[in-house]
Image: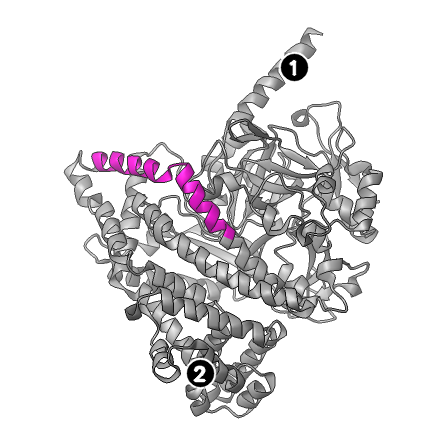
Amino acid sequence: MKQRIFLLLLAAIQLASTTARADEGMWLLHMLKRINEAEMQQMGLNLSAEDIYSLNQACLKDAIITLNGGSCTAEIISDQGLVLTNHHCAYGAIQGFSTVEDDILTNGFWAMALEEEKPIPDFSVTFLQRIEDVTERVLADVTSDMDQATREQTIQGVISQIEEEEKGINPDFRPQIKSFYHGNEFYLFVYRDYTDIRLVGNPPESIGKFGGDTDNWMWPRHTGDFSLLRIYADGDNNPADYSEDNVPYQPKRHLKVSLDGVQNGDFTMIMGYPGSTDRFLSSRGIQQALDLYNPSVVNVRDLKLKTMKKHMDADPAVRIQYAAKYAQTANYWKYYIGQSKGLRALDVYGKKKALEDDFTAWVNESPERRTEYGAALELLSTYYENTDATVQGQVYSLEAGLIGCDLMLFAFRVGMGAQGLFSEDADRAGGAAASLRARAEGFFKDYDMETDRDLFINLMGKYMNDIPADQQPTFFANVNDKYKGDFKRYADKMYPKSFLTDPVRFEEFIANPSEKALEKDLAIAAAMSLIETYRGYFASPEQGKFDEGYRLLTAGLREMSPDKMWYPDANSTMRLSYGTVGDYDPADAVHYDFVTTSDGILQKKDNSNPEFVVDGTLESLLRQRDFGRYADDDGNLVLCFISNNDITGGNSGSPVMNGNGDLIGLAFDGNWEAMSGDIAFEPELQRTISVDIRYVMWVIDKMAGAQNLIDEIDFVTTPKSMPQDMARPLEEGRP
């Protein structure tokens, strides 16, 4: 009895220590052995750093992939190349296969055999092969007296040389060198890409996007945000373009699926490809974001969403065509609203200013430091002073201009790619034609002229009204002179006559290209003017001040606090974060539990609201409570859970793993109270929202009846009578 009391007390102490900690950091895999392994094992990791990242054996990194060059993360969950990711990560593919007659976005889709899987056009996955520190070589010829432009030119020359050497060693691999710590370190990443990817299954949107924009970035959450893909390869397991002869990819490693579930304080780790953070951002940068940048993005996207919604509500076909575009626009519209609110509520500006005051005092303690780092904050301050007047114009040139309506981005791409059509080299001309035809196919499939026309008129009108004339694109002068400043009149001429707005006229141009037709096209003229304006902001000498100041500040902070475990900002390279499952208190008298259950779906149900529809099949199954082996100890079906892992955009679809490296969930969102997290990690509030793997499997098994997919998966459980860290998981095997 005393031994049992002691064990319970020990477990309680361990639980208290794990739930109290918050584990900031997105760590590079090859640094885990030196920096993180011991702490991770103390927290509950039962693996070594070599089990996670190794050059000599199959490891966890071999089961983790990035989608389409970094848009999302995914993981392999069977020895037949079955891939699990978020529903919203495959949303474009799902929408692309949907029609009014066969709307798999609304109704869901499940391939019951390999031959039913749907090849996804223009979709790729990428495997990381290895990481190598090349900092010393990249910076070998850099001197302290170089100006920023010369420094960058020198660095880029060496990077190009190293990448070319790597291509010569193995042309099947793709090398990429990236900057870390804002130009202070450089690492080589070697990748391998696969392009025959097929859609295997997706739940109905009422599950995969349950809660819609209302629940986006919010906890508690009840969203089954998952979908299934499969990687195909040639007979030798190598990458290959789509072919009926291709076979399922045989992975070096795949993840097993744990049915143990989560408890408060459980160890969790997430591997994936976080896109971008700005944790070294200065207080002056935060001020500009709050006052100028964020409100500009929100204002433009608000108009864009309203314009799209009007047309989507009026036509079911347009609703399907624009579903993915609307979701992408809405996601970061709400993100920037939340980020601004979080930055203010948590006084991130004040905290950054205090750190900079400490940095200034440290720099002034030594003449050597003043020489090395004394200009850092001054350079950044000058940059922001000189760009405050233009930052809104920069935002508008992209948000209202290049990506405002589909026609402008398509016109820019055609304007650039069409140059190859006039080449005397037949191969080059043929390649350009094939590339442009492929772009056009994707463009016209999801293009509605009336919707796009309204977007052009509304967003360009806002651009002209909100941004000073000296920052406007040059084609605005033409609109003023010839069309009396009326974008509707410009659109009335552009849309009917441009060869970019009609597939027949477009094909006629490709078959018989004319430089005169290209030059006279109003859409091409507008797009080229917009890209010239957008690029002008980054060609400014002010950008050099920012780059140099940021580099010096980052290097100085690391030197000032050498004992701190500094991790680099996210930049779409594979990272690992670790932490614990945990509840939190977002506000006075408010407490959020660490899990949600299926009861929440029934409580939120409102079939008059498209964001909270619960279809009859799902409702019936939930009310029957036939959860089988996917239920928790109390007989509930857990839907989602939260942990304090450090993630950001690009981590969507990332595997959440337990201490054994087994899959327990998929990360898909962050929480509203910590939307400032890309700039400053908030240990008491920041949470990753993940869909519980048991809910995923229950939907596939009980709702979809896709036994063929369940049969592929390796399930593991830990005996209930033993503490998790003392028991070896038992493999249930495949039925």
Which of discs 2 and 1 lies nearer the camera? The answer is 2
Q: Quick check: can you spot residue 34?
A: yes
Label 1 crowd bin: few (<14), some (14–19), many (20+), radius 10 Å: few
The residue where tag 1 is placed is 7
Q: Looking at the picture, does residue 306 appear above or below residue 372?
A: below
Residue 18 lies within the magenta run: no
* Quadrant (top left/top right/bottom left/bottom right) for the C terminus: top right
Asked whether disc 2 touches disc 1, contact meaning CB atoms under 8 Å apart, the reply is no
Q: Position of residue 344 (x, y in %)?
A: 40, 40
Q: Quick check: can you spot residue 654?
A: no
Q: Position of residue 630 (x, y in %)?
A: 77, 38
Q: Secondary structure at mark 1?
A: helix
**What stretch of residues is rendered in magenta?**
334-362
Q: Looking at the picture, does residue 474 appear above or below residue 175?
A: below
Say which label, 2 or 1, has the lower sequence index. 1
The residue where tag 2 is placed is 522
Q: Whole-Å distance between the Cαs marked 2 and 1?
A: 76 Å
Residue 627 occupies quadrant: top right
Q: Position of residue 198 (x, y in %)?
A: 69, 63
Q: Choose between 249 and 180: the one closer to the eye.
A: 180
Q: Which kind of residue does numbered mark 2 sit on?
A: Leu
Q: Which kind of residue does numbered mark 1 sit on?
A: Leu
Q: Looking at the picture, does residue 99 appear above or below residue 272?
A: below
Q: Secondary structure at mark 2?
A: helix
Residue 565 occupies quadrant: top left
Residue at image x 51%, y 44%?
647
* Quadrant (top left/top right/bottom left/bottom right) for the N terminus: top right
Q: Choose between 82 and 465: the one closer to the eye.
A: 465
Residue 52's label in the rendered image is none
